[in-house]
Amino acid sequence: MKKTLEPLLEKHPFFAGLDQAYLEVLTGCASNLRFRSGEYLFREGDEAKQFFVIREGAVALEVFVPGAGAVTIQTVEEGDVVGWSWLFPPYRWHFSGRVASPLRVLALDGKCLRDKCEQDHDLGYELLKRFSGIMLDRLQATRVQLLDLYGTH
Amino acid sequence: MLGLQTTDFTATLQQNPMLPSLYRVQRVRWDTADTFSLELSPADDGIIPEFMPGQFNMLYIFGVGEIPVSISGDPAQSNLLVHTTRAVGTVSRAMSKLKVDDVLGVRGPFGTGWPVNDVHGKDVVIIAGGIGLAPLRPAMYHIMAKRENYGRVVLLYGARTARDVLYGKQLQQWRAHFDLDVYVTVDRGTDSWRGSVGLVTSLIGRAPFDPLNTAAMVCGPEVMMRFTTLGLEKRGVSAENIYVSLERNMKCGVGLCGHCQLGAAFICKDGPVFPYSRMKYLLSKWEV
Amino acid sequence: MSQQEDRTSYVIDRRDFQSLFDALTNKGYRLVGPTVRHGTVVYDQLTSVTDLPIGYQDQLERGSYRLQKLDHQQLFAYTLSPHSWKKFLYPPTLRLWQAQKYDGNFQFVPEQQAATPLALIGVRACELNAIAIQDRIFLGGDYPDPLYKAQREKLFIVAVNCGHAGNTCFCASMKTGPKADTGFDLGLTEVIQEEHHYFVVEAGSSAGADILSLLPHHPATDEEIEAAAQIVAQTTASMGRTLDTTDLKKFLYANYEHPHWDEIATRCLACGNCTMVCPTCFCSTVEDVTDLRGESAERWRKWDSCFTTDFSYIVGGSIRASVKSRYRQWMTHKLAAWIDQFGTSGCVGCGRCITWCPVGIDITQEVAAMRAEQQLAAEPEGTAGERP
C-alpha cells in the first residue's frame, strides 16, 4: 500500500527534485486520505500530528471570531501544503482547516518525520528549506495584505 | 506701415488637446458600493474615437475639475464609451452624482495600450488587483474576441472582499469559457465567500501558463504590482514580457504639464502601460 | 537660420542704435527687453534705447543679487534678469477655455487668443538655448502647444553676447554660451573702445538681414571683429562656476539613494524659486473656477513647481512627500531625465537657480559634493530612459 504513494509524493511540487532515497523515507510516514466538503481536516487547539500535501481540492484556514463567526484567513489548494504546527512544540493547530472542496491529500506523520530528521540532518535541512520557503511566501503575502492595498485610505 | 498684427487662431485652439468634447451619460451602473461605471456617448452624436485597450481619457465635471480615467469598455463596441472609477476624490465623487442625460467633458484617448497585438501566439496572463481590473477589461474583450491569436489565457484577480469584486457577472461569464482560466481571490474571507482567500500573487504559482512563452499584463496598486512582478519573475517570466500600467498625477494628458513624470517617462504619453523592464529600477525606489 | 559661414559682421554705431528699435516698431513688433524696476533688471516693454539699463551692472552671487549704477554708458553691462523670456511664450497664467451652462447642459467656449509680434531685445546665449529647449518641449511632441506655437512664430530675436560673466554663471560648462551661435535674427556684441561705442552685428536669419538693411551700418573691420571676439573670450575666461557634466546622467540615475540628498533637504525650503526663475522649467497645473451662480466655469493654466506636495498628489497621498525627494526630482530631471526626454540637458548654466535660491543652494556645488562622495556606478537598467 505505502509503496504506491511514492509516485504521488514525487509528483507534488513540494517534493520536486528531492532525492529518491529521501522520498522513500518520507513515503514511510505518509498516508493517502480523502475528505468531503465541509469536513474539518484539523481544528484550532487540537494536537498537530501531521501536515498535508494537497493533491486535489481546497482547504480554508479559519479562525473563529466571536460575533463574526468563522473567518477565512487563507485558502490553500492543489499544489500547496498545509500545516507546520507539527514542527514546533507544543504541536497545536493555531487555525482550523475546513475542507472547501472535495479533497485528496497525503498526510505526513509529524512524529515520524521529526524522528527521521533527527537521525538524518541532511533530510531535516532539505525539508526545512522547503518549509521555510513556503513560510516566507505566506509571511510576505500576509504583510502585503496588512497594507489593505485596495482600501480607500 | 504695418500695424500690430494679430492672429485669430480659434481654429488652432479647437484642435487644442486641452479642449474637451461634450459627452452625455447614457447609463450609470454601480459595480460595487463605491465603484461605478458611466456609459457615455458624444453629445453632438459624433463619433467616439477608437482606442487601444489600456488607454485613458481626461474626464471633466463642470466647474469641479478633471481627472484621468482608464477606458474600460469593449474596444470593438463603437457606440458607447465606458469608464469605471471609484468615488474617492472631489472630481470622482462629483462624477458619481451624474445622472442619465447629464453632460461631461472628455479629452482623449491618451497614452499607450496593452500590447494585445504584439503577443500573438503567446500565453497571456492578466493579473489585476482591485479597480486595476478596469483598464484590463478592454484587453480581455479584445483577446476573447480574437481568441485564436493567443495560447492559454489566464485571468488572476484579487479584490479586498467579496463585495469589492468588480464586474462579477462578467467574471462568471468568462469563467464559463473552456478556453479561459479565471481565478479570483480576496484578501478578507468574509460573508458567504466560498472562493480563494489570499493575495493575488499566491495564484501565480499554480496558474496554467508557460512562463517562457507568456506575456503578463498587470494592473493594480503599485505595491501589488511590485509583488506580482516578483512572483512572475520567480515563476520564470522575464521582465521584458511583463507589462504594467502605472498611475501618477496628471493635468494635461499630453506630456506638457510635467506632473506625471517617473524617471524619464511621462506616464501620460510614454505610458500608462510600460514593459516592466523599462520601469523596474524606478519602481523599487522610494518617492520617485 | 542661415549657416554661420554666410555671416558677415557689420557694425552699428551706438548713436544709431535707436534705429533698430524704430525699424522693429515700424515692422509691427512690440519690443520687450531689459529695463530697471525696483533695483532689478526685468524684461518688459521697451519704447526707446533709454529704457535699457544703461550703466547698470548686476552682481550675481549664491543667494544674492545686487544691481549697481556705474559710471559708464554701456547698454548691456548687466548679465541676467531674474525674468526669463519664457513668460512671453508660455505665460505664467493663461485661460484655456470657458464653459457656459444652459438648459441644464453646458458648452465649451474656446479661448480667443491673439499672438502679437514680439521683438526680444538682449537675449543671452544661454537664453537662446533655453528657448530652443522649450521649443522641443512645447512643439516637438505629438500635441504641440497651440499658443506657444503661435507666439513662437511671431518672434524677432536680438541676441546680445555677454560682456561680463556673473559669479553664478556656468554656460561655458553647459556649452550654451557666452557667444550666441544660432537661434537669433540679429546677434550683437557691444564694444566700448575709448571714444568709440558700437555693436558688432551678425544676421542670423533673412528677417534679421532685412532689418539690418534698414539700419545705418557698415562692414566690420578686422579690428572691430577682433575686439568683439576678445570680449566673448574674456567672458568665457571669467565664468563664475563650472559643472562637470561628464556622465552626469548615468551618475544621477545611479544615485537616487545618495546621502547628500538628505543633506540638501536640511537646507532646501521647497519654495520653488529655482523652478520659477529657471528658463527651461515647463511644468504647469490647471485650475478650474466657477462664478458664484455656478453658471459659467473657466479653466486656467498656471506655472507649477515640482517642489509642492500637491504636484505629485494621487489618491492616497503625495508620491513625493519629503523635501529630499522633491529636490532630487528637480535636479535629476533637469540634469539627467531631460536628456532622455528631449535629447538635451534641461540646464543652460544661467545660474538663476543659484542666485535666486533664498538659502543659496548651488546646483554646481551639490553635484560636485555628490561626486566627491560617490564613485560613478554603471547606469542602471530600467530607468525609463530607453525606449522599447
Image (cartoon, rainbow, N blue to C red):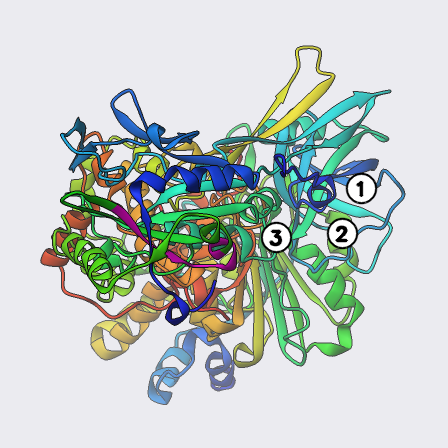
Q: Which residue is mark 1?
A: B39
Q: Chain of mark 3?
A: C
Q: Chain of mark 1?
A: B
Residue B33 lies, in percent from the top left, at: 67, 32
Q: Position of residue C17 (x, y in %)?
A: 36, 41
Residue contact at pointers 1 and 3, CB within 8 angstroms: no
C-alpha span from label 1 to label 3? 27 Å
Label 2 CA crowd tier, 10 Å (few <14, some 14–19, many 20+): many
For the residues labelled 2 and 1, the Cα–Cα distance comes to: 9 Å
Tell me the SS state at disc 1: strand
Kindly check if marks 2 and 1 are in contact, taking CB atoms under 8 A apart as contact: yes
Residue at the right extreme, as displayed: B45
For residue A109, above or below residue C305: below
Residue underneath mark 3: C143
Residue C202 in magenta?
yes
Q: Give the magenta range.
A: C198-209
Residue B73 - label: 2
